[in-house]
Image (tube, rainbow, N blue to C red):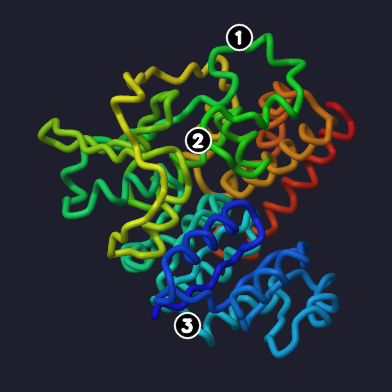
Amino acid sequence: MKNIFIVGSTGALGREAIEVIESLGDEYKILGITGFNNENLLVEQAKKFNTRYLGASKEVLPKLKKGIEGAYIFDVQSDLVNVLEDLKPDLTLFLASGINSLPSIINNVSNGLMTAIANKESIIAGGDLVFNANTRKYILPVDSEASAVFQALLGEALNSINRIILTASGGPFIDYAYDTLDNISPELALKHPNWVMGNKITIDSATMVNKAFEVIESHFLFGIPYSKINVLVHKESVVHSLVEFSDGMLKAVLSVPKMLFPLQYAITYPERIYNEFSKLHLEDIGKLSFERVDINKFKAFSTVLEYGKKGGNFLPIAVAADEVLVGAFLGGLIGFNEINDYLKKIIDVFEYTEVNSYEAIEFFYKSASSKAREFVRRKT
């Protein structure tokens, strides 16, 4: 029996994780789940899987307690670290967005608990605190690109890596000219050609901020210098990543573009288990294309990478600024290209400094969020 705790079970990725676990049968048990404010879905999930540990924001805890009897119900923001430390699940899936999960991730890997992460914000903002030679042994990537790299590196020596090649779909606007994007609506930006994802990550894909985050993510996950991480646009989203080795040979990991695959890989690792997911038929695709990223069009991609490589406080600052700007775009407060414009302006407000604690990360994250909201409000 493999006991699994899902942080972020009510989000798009969390719901898919539950679908995977349900398909795997009785050998996989959902020990605990957390949402934030979606108490109705959380109650539904808990009842369906007889889940005994439920975490949510303190605002909805009274409603949860009325909806579920006999379960341990807790404040996800203040109590998650202790709950996971007490339960010691076989695997914790961190699928929620934002940096609230960061203390729990740090505690999990420090205590040698297997941890699967799709929470880019925590990986990036807290990368220096989470990852070292010891903790990497307990971390499984869930993002399709990082999972592909992880799989390609199995059995390989890290010093044999020549480069990692992350692929990017380019989002819905890969064939648009930059100056035609000013009046793009949120509805159009949310129509990703290949992937079904949450709103935030879909917009990040459209700006390619998501791919800059994945470069940073790969740097921390695998301990690889930025100089050895490249990005290619691959419109078909079939090749999820490639690794080139010192002898010139490349390994690639391919599948249908569905998050069910990397989710199941993380959940069942180190085993591979048969599933009924749609399989990839290359003969139906016909061809696979690759091209360089147009940095003149995807300016936010370049901005995030520029500051991300500097590290320190620029990491939580970039994460927070992007979150606010994406929210502002989805709310109709700024245009699509203004995400690019404001991002650099906001980060430029701050001077570089090292961060060596969660408190420092949280401080700069909140400061950047406040500054971003100010920029949006003033239209400066």
Residue located beneath label 3 in the image: 88
**Real-space Cα distance between discs 2 and 3?**
33 Å
Q: Is residue 333 above or below residue 32?
A: above
The amino acid at mark 1 is: Ala
Residue furthest to the left: 247
Above-or-below relation of 270 to 338 = below
Q: Few, some or many C-alpha atoms within 10 Å of disc 2 (few <14, some 14-19, many ≥20)?
A: many
Pointer 1 local density, CA inside 10 Å: few below 14, some 14–19, many at least 20: few
Pointer 3 with pointer 1, Cβ within 8 A: no
Q: Earlier in the sequence, mark 3 or mark 1?
A: 3
Residue 61: x %, y % from top left: 80, 76
Mark 2 and mark 1: Cα distance apart in space = 20 Å
* Secondary structure of the residue carrying numbered label 2: helix
**Residue at figure coordinates x 60%, y 28% from the top left:** 206
| 2 or 3: tag closer to the N-terminus | 3
Numbered badge on residue 177? 1
Amino acid type assigned to the residue bearing label 2 in the image: Ala
**Amino acid type, residue under disc 3 in the picture:** Lys
- The answer to the question of whether label 2 and label 3 lie on touching residues, with beta carbons closer than 8 A, is no
Where on the picture, by quarter, is residue 231? top left
Residue drawn at x 88%, y 35% as measured from the top left? 377
Secondary structure of the residue carrying numbered label 3 = loop
Quarter placement of the C terminus: top right
Residue receiving disc 2: 212
Q: Relative to residue 357, is residue 75 drawn left or right?
A: right
